[in-house]
Image (cartoon, rainbow, N blue to C red):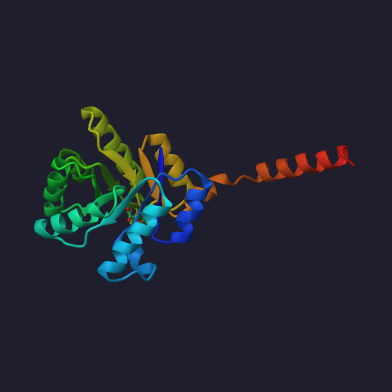
Amino acid sequence: MKFFIDTANLEEIAEAQALGVLDGVTTNPSLMAKEGITGEANILAHYKKICDIVEGDVSAEVISTDFEGMVKEGEALAALHPQIVVKLPLIADGIKACKYFSDKGIRTNVTLVFSAGQALLAAKAGATYVSPFLGRLDDISTDGLNLIAEIRQIYDNYAFDTQILAASIRHTMHVIDCAKIGSDVMTGPLSSITGLLKHPLTDIGLAKFLADYKKGNE
Ligand code: E4P
């Protein structure tokens, strides 16, 4: 299972990278705005900085909603750095653009996916990644994990290559449940990764080992 971090914060990306388990980064316009990154030139420069920190895929989202605009933006993003994956919204023009990029060998991440039917369309259009938003479904009392399971079954039925990128992860249990279902990738905040480290018995056990060593070596 690949671990992506869902942020545009360079310090958090560097911390996850330093842990040695990071496989990539996802961003979106809201995450860029949260870091105060505005204006096309600054946004493009920020993507380059992210690519310099991580070794894996970096999703960069288009803001156009028409096919021509998405193609123009996506080509510019893909030309920025070999690690860039063009992130496209799941709307009709997004699916057309996904097919266009897939035919050209440019990798894509189809985002804002909330149903199995949408995920099927993304796979048929040749998406590299499909991003079902688990947390946002849970937020409206709908079973987000069930959607991940449905997509897993459909993709396996037809051996689609599209990787399921469980997005909008909120906490460590989401990560574990997605791993059990067989999601190819998860993207979440730094806390959803570092939270996996924690267990009180680990802390208690380590303290005891160190205390016993100290006693034996006094
Ligand atoms: C992923 O690509 C999305 O941008 C992200 O996971 C959305 O998460 P949120 O629901 O926490 O905003």
Q: Is residue 111 visible?
A: no
Q: Nearer the viewer, residue 97 or 157?
A: 97
- Going by the picture, which residue comes out furthest to the left? 68
Q: Is residue 200 above or below residue 89?
A: above
- Split into quadrants, the picture shows ligand 1 in the one at bottom left
Q: Residue at 46% across / 41% down in the picture?
A: 176
Q: Is residue 169 above or below residue 215?
A: below
Q: Count the numbered circles shown.
A: 0
- Residue 147 placement: quadrant: top left
Identify the image quadrant of the C terminus. Answer: top right
Identify the image quadrant of the N terminus. Answer: top left
Q: Is residue 166 visible?
A: yes
- Give percent across and percent down for residue 29: 29, 63
Q: Is residue 137 above or below residue 180?
A: below
- Residue 165 placement: quadrant: top left
- Give percent across and percent down for residue 55: 40, 46
Relative side of 196 to 161, left or right? right
Q: Nearer the viewer, residue 74 or 173?
A: 74
Relative side of 16 to 37, left or right? right
- Residue 217 placement: quadrant: top right
- Going by the picture, which residue comes out furthest to the right? 218
- Give percent across and percent down for residue 126: 18, 40
- Give percent across and percent down for residue 213: 81, 39
Relative side of 202 to 93, left or right? right
Q: Residue at 32% across / 65% down in the picture?
A: 30
